[in-house]
Amino acid sequence: MEHPDPGHILQTATAFWASKVLLTAVELDLFTALDGEGQTAAQLGDQLGLHPRGTYDFFDALVALKFLDREGDGPAGRYRNTAATGAFLSKKSPAYIGGLPQMLNSRLFGFWNHLGTALRTGQPQNEIRHSGKPMFEELYADQARLGEFLDAMTGFQAANFQRLAEKFDFSRYRTVSDVGGALALLSRIVAARHPHLSCTSFDLPAVAPHAQKHIDAAGLAGRIRAVSGDFFADALPKADVVTMGNILHDWNLEKKKTLIRKAFEALPKGGAFIAIENLIDDARRENAFGLLMSLNMLIEFGDAFDYTGADFAAWCREAGFERCEFIALEGPTAAAIAYK
Ligand SMILES: C[S@@+](CC[C@H](N)C(=O)[O-])C[C@H]1O[C@@H](n2cnc3c(N)ncnc32)[C@H](O)[C@@H]1O
């Protein structure tokens, strides 16, 4: 008989140590501070304003965790970014996705400390825990928090939208409405890859100026419109393809179904509705990230949850869609597609 091994238990139980080391490095903007030459522990510690007591352990933990490279040892050792941290966690890189770890650090790390309370009460554990306000109203009441949240979404979805632009056959369609489009990232990526498409990025009025800034910077103002509205109060902008990235999982079942019905109404016959989410596997045994994301929705919204492909297909059939298919994107994320 195989002896049980406690390794997996211990590794997961202490996983937050590694997570917090990475998140703190992003908080300190360590990866931006490192230049091509590399820096000694003393130089880097001074630059980041750190007490010398913890610097070697902190920087070497990042080496052991494969977030830094080090050439040489001891005081003469020089630390450098790895290819991945230089590309994705240095603000000097156009592919920077540090907004996501920043939000995980400043908001969710603390809120997840109340997971037990969320499980016992079914109540959200974030900023709305005491205010009782709707989540996005509360989140967007503070401009800095709004900016941080929108940047974090970019970190989550950039690679998925790239894969969608490559894998979904957009050649049959002319217009795309991205509902809850945040910084218009999906529209920018899809429009850049498929020059025949016109896109609309639809989101709350507080978000539109931020989206417009990014559309202008990408030189895509002629191809992408940023439209303000409320997807519960207003009709969705009509298009051949309606996309929703991480939108359905923000809401309870009734509101999910309302959004699916509104997507159906916005499409012509033959049109496609695409949800880009961390779809849980139908047996609910394998996609741990999707299941953890669903717990994150409990913490953020209380009654919101992630779902399986089978759930999506059943809701879409109920709304009148003819058939569904699924395309794997990055890691645990998939595009769930329903055709009208
Ligand atoms: C979780 S974010 C997803 C953003 C983006 N689609 C993505 O995949 O990264 C949810 C988005 O829905 C927008 N949103 C929330 N409530 C909305 C409403 N009632 N009407 C329109 N947009 C809304 C938020 O402003 C936010 O940009």
Image: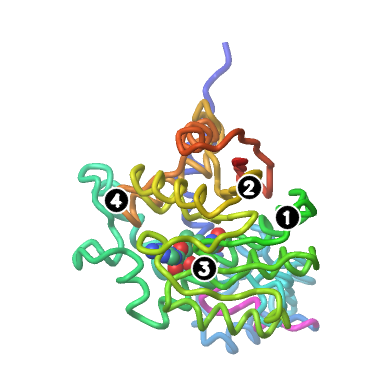
**Place of residue 174 in the rendered image (x, y in percent of width and height, measured from the top left):** 72, 60
**Place of residue 116 in the rendered image (x, y in percent of width and height, measured from the top left):** 27, 46
Question: Which badge, 1 or 4, comes first in the chain's sequence?
Answer: 1
Quadrant housing residue 107: bottom left
**Circle 4: residue type:** Gly
Q: Which residue is mark 2?
A: 272
C-alpha span from label 2 to label 3:
17 Å
Question: Which quarter of the image is occupied by the N terminus?
Answer: top right
Quadrant housing residue 130: bottom left
- Residues marked 1 and 4 touching at CB (< 8 Å): no
Q: Which residue is mark 3?
A: 202
Q: Crowding near pointer 2: few (<14 within 10 Å), some, many (20+)?
A: many
- Residues marked 3 and 1 touching at CB (< 8 Å): no
Residue occupying the point 24% across, 45% down: 122
C-alpha span from label 1 to label 4:
37 Å
**Residue 280 numbered mark, or none:** none
- Residues marked 2 and 1 touching at CB (< 8 Å): yes
- Residues marked 3 and 4 touching at CB (< 8 Å): no
In this rendering, does residue 334 appear at all? no
Which residue is most to the top?
1
| Range covered by the magenta-colored residues | 26-36
Q: Is mark 3 within 8 Å of ligand 1?
A: yes
Q: Which residue is mark 1?
A: 173
Which mark is nearer the camera, 1 or 4? 1
Q: Which residue is mark 4?
A: 302
Residue 30 within the magenta-colored segment of the rendering: yes
